[in-house]
Image (tube, helix red, strand yellow):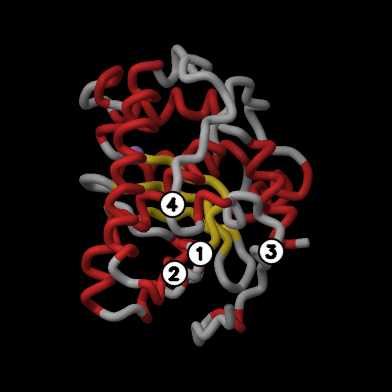
Amino acid sequence: MMRTGHHLAEKSYSMDNLSVYNSACMSYPYTLPPLAYAYNALDPHIDEQTMRLHHDKHHQAYIDNANKIVEKHPELQTRTLVEIMTDFDRLPADIRKVLRGPGGGHLNHSLFWDYLAPQSSGEPQGKLAQSIKKTFDGFVQFKEQFNRAAVSCSGSGWAWLWLTPRGGLEIGATANQDTPLSKGNLPILGLDVWEHAYYLKYHNRRPDYVMHWWQVVNWKKAEEQFEATTG
Ligand code: MN
């Protein structure tokens, strides 16, 4: 597949070695990637019932809806969802309108499960740790800035640590299921702050959910991604 996005040539990172992006679940017909851990493995930080509903029902619904849309557009079926969402702004308006939520939802959630792990190291190591400390003046400062992005994102959305097209780390947020890839930013770590991600356990207390989430961050995955993309 020839990439035609005008901004793609300017990117300093490579996505070739990223497992999630090359996964079969990103090829049409889209499928639900299995969790790498048990539904109750993140307890007490993220409870089993939330994980079951979030993964089996919410994520599956994004997949079902994306498949229904792409079924009607054979020209999209030969591209991976990653390619489609990366070039999202160049899609015809009628497709953008319907695919934005389901397509971004499938991509974002497929990343999200991998960003979680029962045994978190608590802090990143290696090149990612160095880059975070350099960019944000320290790991504590990084966490504070990320927390602000997660808590201040109004309504449904995501907080992210991403790599900009120029190769710098940046904290940001996206609304609803918009994916950072559509603006050329490559996710390194992302947090779902939709109510369906936390409401059963934390009710309206999103900051509590965010604080607990740090206990189950899969830094190893983030490190792998960072090193795979930046070489
Ligand atoms: Mn979600």
Query: Looking at numbered disc 2 in the image, what kind of residue is underneath it?
Result: Ile
Tell me the distance, in whole angstroms, between the alpha carbons under discs 2 and 4: 13 Å
Of labels 1 and 4, earlier in sequence is: 4
Dot 4, how many residues are within 10 Å of its Cα: few (below 14), some (14-19), or many (20+)? many
Query: Residue at image x 37%, y 42%?
Result: 150
Tell me the distance, in whole angstroms, between the alpha carbons under discs 4 and 3: 20 Å
Tell me the distance, in whole angstroms, between the alpha carbons under discs 1 and 4: 9 Å
Query: Looking at numbered disc 4 in the image, what kind of residue is underneath it?
Result: Tyr
Element marked by disc 4: loop
Of labels 3 and 2, earlier in sequence is: 3
Q: Position of residue 2 (x, y in %)?
A: 58, 82
Q: Position of residue 56 (x, y in %)?
A: 36, 31
Location of residue 28 with respect to 205 vertically, above or below: below
Residue 102 is drawn in which quadrant? bottom left
Q: Mark 1–mark 2 contact, CB under 8 Å? A: yes
Location of residue 216 with respect to 166 vertically, above or below: above
Horizontal arrangement in the rendering, residue 213 relative to residue 21 (left or right): left
Residue 142 is drawn in which quadrant? top right
Horizontal arrangement in the rendering, residue 129 relative to residue 59 (left or right): right
Dot 3, how many residues are within 10 Å of its Cα: few (below 14), some (14-19), or many (20+)? few
Tell me the distance, in whole angstroms, between the alpha carbons under discs 3 and 2: 16 Å
Between 177 and 129, the residue placed more toward the observer is 177
Query: Looking at numbered disc 3 in the image, what kind of residue is underneath it?
Result: Asp
Q: Position of residue 37 (x, y in %)?
A: 57, 23
Circle number at residue 84: 2
**Residue occupied by mark 4:** 30
Between 113 and 151, the residue placed more toward the observer is 113
**Residue occupied by mark 1:** 80
Circle number at residue 16: 3
